[in-house]
Image: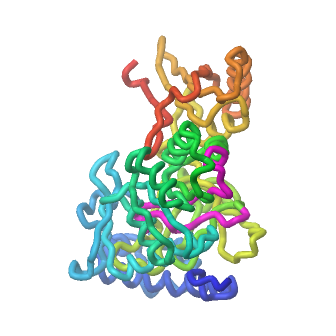
Amino acid sequence: MKKRFMPAVKTARELREVQREGLKWTVNHAHQGSSFYRSKMDEAGVRPKDIRSLDDLKRLPFTTAQDLRSDYPFPLLSVPFEKVVRIHASSGTTGKRKVLCYTQKDLDDWANMFARCYEMAGLTREDRVQIAVGYGLWTAGVGFQLGCERFGAMTVPVGPGSRDMHCELMVDLQSTVFCCTASMGLLMAEEIHRRNLRDKISVGKVIFGAERHSAAMRRKIEAYFGLEETFDIPGLTELYGPGTGLECEKHEGIHYWVDYYILEIIDPDTLESAPPGETGEMVVTTLRKEAAPLIRYRTRDLTHLKPEPCSCGSMLPRHGPLLGRTDDMFIIRGVNIYPGQIDDILSREDKVGSEYQVILMRRDGKDHMTIRVEHAESASLSENEEIAARLEDSVRRKLFVRCKVELVDYGTLPRTERKSKRVLDERDKS
């Protein structure tokens, strides 16, 4: 079948040339249109004519989330206002919202990227795509819808909505694809299981992202829906929104759209390039974005590049799953820990569920960590003590810190339609 939305180029060399020309265009466009970027480049002693090859990317200064907030309300704007047709914004949980502007070309490019995601997931125009992510300033809902309409499948734009509505529409409309956050996917999977709807619905694929999810959570969503496949999709408001990459059917990592942006992985402490395959911070540079181009933007998302070719045969490069964010990291007794590391340990224990919380407390002048995790539905309560001891030992051996593991009844930890809060740091209140 002809791939309508994949890159027209045929070789890695052609892709690199697309990137080189895109980088030169972006730097020149940003320098001419944005006083912010012009000032940054002047401070770094770099001019657009100095950027001749991809190796020159490292001569450019980094851009950060703080730069976006400092330039509020229209950061990085590189076109006249009359060319701006839409804005989106981040949640603003750590200060002012990060507002990003879009031209019509930006929206067209975003639609094409997202249509490419649906194509890579193996959808056809006969699919019915039920969208369960938020609409409004957030990029998610409108991004999923924009791409679906560009791809040509039927869109069912519900938003997070209610579980009753989603269940009713899955049954009545026979939706075949469900798009959601990982947390919403679990919520709906458990609801389908509780209502015994698995044989009454036709959902064969779930596309989810927007947050770190564990292998255990993914297995449960697949089992309760009765799915053929699930697909992990990354998303970042600053980089258009969701749809900038997707797993292929081999599920060996996330193919990212190298013809739309350059991805670097750096050590967040030294700011030097991380060795191939080593985890670090994602840094992105856009190649076509008009209204708010990104130049070496530090996303704070953690992942690694996969240097070996994918067995699917695609020449598009891959990165691993998102392991969390640099600002998700917490320090306990001098040890740096990311929630993704705890995810990994818990996912290897088949007698616990996918939902957990990490509670950090300070008692008698010392930090203490408790991991509260649900036992699996099929697990015997008599095994809780043995399971907890096994997990405590795994955490101590793999993360080099002691903790207490508490097993709680299945279904008692909070569920959410958006993103689950995993770490509860109570140390300032202790």
Q: Position of residue 39 (x, y in %)?
A: 31, 72
Q: Residue at x 57, y 53 (%)?
A: 201
Q: Residue at x 44, y 44 (%)?
A: 163
Q: Residue at x 53, y 57 (%)?
A: 178
Where is the N terminus found, in terms of image quarters? bottom right
Q: Is residue 129 magenta?
A: no
Looking at the rendering, which quadrant does residue 76 occupy?
bottom left
Q: Nearer the viewer, residue 342 or 3?
A: 3
Looking at the rendering, which quadrant does residue 262 occupy?
bottom right
- Asked if residue 283 is positioned above or below residue 11 in the image, the reply reads above
- Asked if residue 210 is positioned above or below residue 33 in the image, the reply reads above
Q: Position of residue 42 (x, y in %)?
A: 35, 75
Q: Residue at x 44, y 40 (%)?
A: 416
Read off the magenta span: 222-250
Residue at the far top in the pictured view:
364
Rendering colour mode: rainbow
Q: Is residue 235 magenta?
A: yes
